[in-house]
Amino acid sequence: MYLITKWFGIFLIDKKNNILKKHLFLNNYLEIAKILIKIENNEILPEEIDIIRGIKENQITVNEKRLRKIGNYKPDDLIFKKIILNFKSFNFTFDIFLKASLKSVEYKLEKELKLKDYQVIQMIKSLDNLIQVSNLLSERLDNWLMIHTPKYKIEPFKKIINNIKKEIIRLENQIKIDVNKLAPNCCKIIGPIITARLISLSGNMENLSKMPASTIQILGAENAFFRFKKEGGKNPKHGIIYQNKIINQSPKKYRGKISRLIATKLSIAINADFYTKRDISNMLINDIKIRLKEIQNL
């Protein structure tokens, strides 16, 4: 018996080209797209297992490498060349196949994008860890230098600190390269390092794109926000975006309004970066400049 999987279904064929069993997929391009991705990832489909249930493995012949675990792999068998399974005979259309193929590509791109998100998240977390270690060791070195110590004892420690600082610079540069490709609009507004921190704090770009501007504004200040909710006091006006010089170098009385302005534009920018891929940075930056003048003239 021969096991053949097409984009529209799974078929069990005998030597005379008779269909012994068949399992047709749902006539829905979204479901077929998921099947196409599984096949491309070399997964064995549950439906393929079901259709040969009760049949010995040595009685099944397959023409796909991914199916070698459930049958004899003989791609050159003449049956596979002779058998004709037309999707139209099973009420499927080429339009369904085309839509499913395009959707499967979209799924793959989304997955790849998320993987890039997670790479950025790991890099920014590693950067923060290195900075923390560097600060701690530098403080220890300063204390050590206050007492008379032979040079040969302290030099290896200095080399460790210098190597960590070099790695911080290398990692920062790599983050800038990657994030500028991933979220160019956001990077032009607030810089790649802060953009990377926003992605990390939100979990991924998709999560960040779904956040309202008010949430983006206080990302990184969650503890202060929950304390405000529980105990009262002052509501935090900004989170990690405060690291941007447009905010932290402005007069204190303007920082809240400027934070709201930047967060609003970032909300638009991240949607463009994640969904449309359009470069709208110049428009957003011009809007920020105009609004900044209005705020400072209040």
Image (cartoon, rainbow, N blue to C red):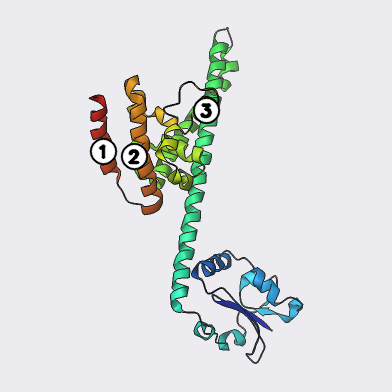
Disc 3 packing (10 Å; few <14; some 14–19; many ≥20): few
Query: Which residue: 40% across, 28% down?
Result: 242
- The 10 Å Cα crowd at callout 2, few under 14, some 14 to 19, many 20 or more, is many
Instruction: Report helix, strand or loop for mark 3.
Output: helix
Residue drawn at (41%, 50%) of the image: 274
Q: Earlier in the sequence, mark 2 or mark 1?
A: 2
Q: Amino acid at mark 3?
A: Lys
Residue at image point 26% right, 33% down:
291
Q: Are marks 2 and 1 in contact (CB under 8 Å)?
A: yes
The image shows residue 22 at horizontal and vertical percentages of 63, 81
Tell me how far mark 2 sits from mark 1, CA to CA. 8 Å
User: Which circle's residue, 3 or 1, is located before the other in the chain?
Assistant: 3
Against 273, residue 190 (above or below) is above
Q: Quadrant of residue 12?
A: bottom right
* Residue in front for this viewpoint, 47 or 213: 213
**Distance from Cα at disc 2 to Cα at disc 3:** 26 Å
Assess disc 1: are there few (<14), some (14-19) or many (≥20) residues with their C-alpha within 10 Å of its C-alpha.
few
Measured from the top left, where is residue 239 in percent x and y?
Answer: 45, 30
Is 187 placed left or right of 67 in the picture?
Answer: left
- Image quadrant where residue 51 sits: bottom right
Q: Quadrant of the C terminus?
A: top left
**Could you tell me which secondary element the residue under label 1 belongs to?**
helix
Determine which quarter of the picture holds residue 284. top left
Mark sitting on residue 229: 3
From the image, tell me which residue sits under label 1. 287
Q: Is residue 5 visible?
A: no
Residue type at mark 2 is Lys
